[in-house]
Image (cartoon, helix red, strand yellow):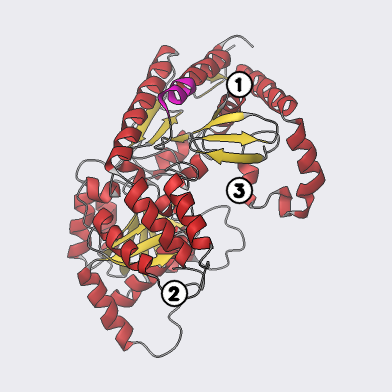
């Protein structure tokens, strides 16, 4: 009788491993279990934010403190943190310059709908880091992407955004579309979505320039919204010439190009856009840009800004539909200045890059040793092991490569051994605070988990 395999792992061994690791986790965290039983019932679904239920463990840990690249929980476990708030704390938990900026600004007020001198300094630093854009401040990358799309539609007079199948741009409604048999449809699983999103969005496959050209030729696409690398899935790298092709096609068809760098800021100083000399019309980055304080920025090139001002001058008086009251507050600017000037530095990126390469080499070695049909992808400080052969070409291939049962078991196994990685996929981040010993422990733990998975049940 033939064995049943998932990603090269026998299903009986996978089930036995997952059961053992879940039991070990539950046994080691009794305080968290009791506290959650007593207090979590006031939250919808038992969690403050619904995606917290997606962690694969039997129940959540409760964090006591986080510093640098380590987390301590209520049961006195200390973890090497490679999740880092899934990019929000990519520069480490509470970087000292950011913590000092928060303390100082807290004595001066948290929000007052007026700028500070730090706002002007932050604007100069944003331009120094990311290029000559004209900036606006938001609270989340979702908001920044939503505002950027509104600007693109105002400038072009066109209704649609082109996104890539399997993309992630926060919770912008228009981006939740998929490709089914070559047609753009609402993505499955959307909650409470009553509109047909294909009226305002078109989906193409990443790396498919012919598909992009066919979509743009219809003349109704205001903007291409893309990450430089597909993330928040099994990572997909751009093929040679893809980004140059996107730029040329967008110019030929009068479509704006929006680059969402919220995850790929891991690529290096200035993000993937600056490292690889991309030329978007609109640039977006969020999450870690202010050291973990909720902040996002979006910027227009001078030429795009001029077109925006022309469109803005033509509109009727009234609300523009952009902006939120708490955005561009003085605490954000204080943290932006601290992060851009003292944390987001060439030396820190060099440290992150070196350790990320060490991590990716170690993971590859373990995968080869265990003869698994997997591969590893790295984008600067961002590393991911993928439980399928690679490289992946597009979102459809990334969805097929995702192996939730295998990944959940590995995640719990790593956590039980002291290494925390991102819950939704196999992503790991290196911060300026991460140390070589932590990377080596993660590689050793990964090898141990694979050994346990592959041995007899």
- Please state if 274 lies on the left or on the right of 194 as rendered: left
Tag 3 secondary structure: helix
Residue at numbered disc 3: 51
Q: Report how far apart the C-alphas of labels 2 and 1 lie in the structure.
A: 49 Å
Residue at x 45% of width, y 21% of height: 443
Q: Residue at x 27, y 58 (%)?
A: 214
Identify the image quadrant of the N terminus. Answer: top right
Examine the structure image and report whether residue 36 is included in the region drawn in magenta. no
Q: Are marks 3 and 2 in contact (CB under 8 Å)?
A: no
Callout 2: SS: loop
| x and y percentages locating residue 272 in the rendered image | 28, 47
Magenta segment: 435-442
Binning the other alpha carbons within 10 Å of mark 2 as few (below 14), some (14 to 19) or many (20 upward) gives few
Q: CA distance from mark 3 to mark 2?
A: 26 Å
Residue located beneath label 2 in the image: 322
Q: Secondary structure at mark 1?
A: helix
């Amino acid at each position: 009788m033939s064995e049943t395999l998932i990603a090269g792992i026998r299903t009986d061994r996978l089930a036995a491993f997952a059961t053992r690791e879940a039991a070990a986790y539950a046994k080691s965290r009794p305080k968290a279990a009791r506290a959650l039983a007593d207090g979590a019932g006031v939250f919808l679904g038992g969690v403050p934010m619904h995606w917290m239920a997606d962690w694969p463990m039997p129940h959540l840990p409760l964090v006591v403190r986080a510093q640098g690249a380590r987390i301590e929980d209520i049961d006195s476990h200390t973890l090497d943190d490679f999740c880092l708030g899934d990019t929000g704390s990519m520069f480490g938990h509470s970087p000292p310059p950011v913590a000092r900026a928060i303390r100082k600004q807290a004595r001066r007020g948290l929000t007052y709908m007026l700028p500070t001198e730090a706002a002007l300094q932050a604007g100069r630093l944003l331009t120094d880091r990311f290029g000559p854009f004209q900036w606006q401040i938001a609270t989340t990358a979702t908001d920044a992407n939503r505002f950027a799309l509104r600007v693109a539609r105002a400038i072009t007079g066109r209704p649609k955004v082109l996104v890539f199948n399997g993309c992630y741009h926060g919770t912008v409604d228009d981006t939740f579309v998929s490709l089914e048999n070559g047609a753009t449809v609402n993505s499955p699983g959307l909650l409470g979505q009553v509109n047909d999103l294909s009226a305002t969005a078109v989906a193409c496959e990443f790396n498919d320039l012919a598909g992009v050209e066919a979509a743009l030729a219809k003349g109704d696409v205001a903007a291409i919204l893309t990450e430089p690398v597909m993330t928040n899935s099994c990572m997909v790298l751009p093929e040679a010439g893809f980004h140059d092709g996107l730029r040329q096609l967008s110019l030929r068809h009068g479509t704006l190009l929006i680059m969402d760098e919220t995850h790929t800021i891991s690529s290096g100083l200035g993000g993937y856009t600056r490292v690889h000399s991309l030329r978007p019309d609109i640039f977006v980055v969020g999450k870690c840009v202010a050291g973990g304080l909720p902040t996002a920025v979006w910027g227009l090139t001078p030429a795009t800004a001029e077109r925006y001002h022309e469109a803005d001058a033509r509109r009727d008086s009234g609300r523009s539909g952009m902006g939120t009251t708490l955005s561009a507050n003085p605490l954000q600017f204080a943290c932006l200045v601290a992060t851009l000037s003292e944390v987001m530095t060439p030396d820190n990126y060099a440290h992150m890059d070196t350790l990320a390469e060490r991590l990716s080499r170690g993971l590859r070695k373990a995968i080869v040793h265990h003869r698994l049909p997997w591969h590893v992808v790295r984008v600067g400080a961002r590393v991911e092991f993928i439980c399928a052969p690679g490289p992946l070409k597009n979102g459809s291939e990334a969805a097929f490569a995702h192996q939730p049962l295998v990944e959940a078991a590995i995640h719990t196994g790593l956590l039980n051994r002291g290494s925390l990685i991102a819950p939704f996929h196999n992503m790991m981040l290196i911060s300026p605070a991460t140390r070589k010993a932590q990377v080596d422990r993660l590689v050793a733990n990964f090898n141990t988990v694979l050994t346990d998975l592959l041995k007899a049940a």
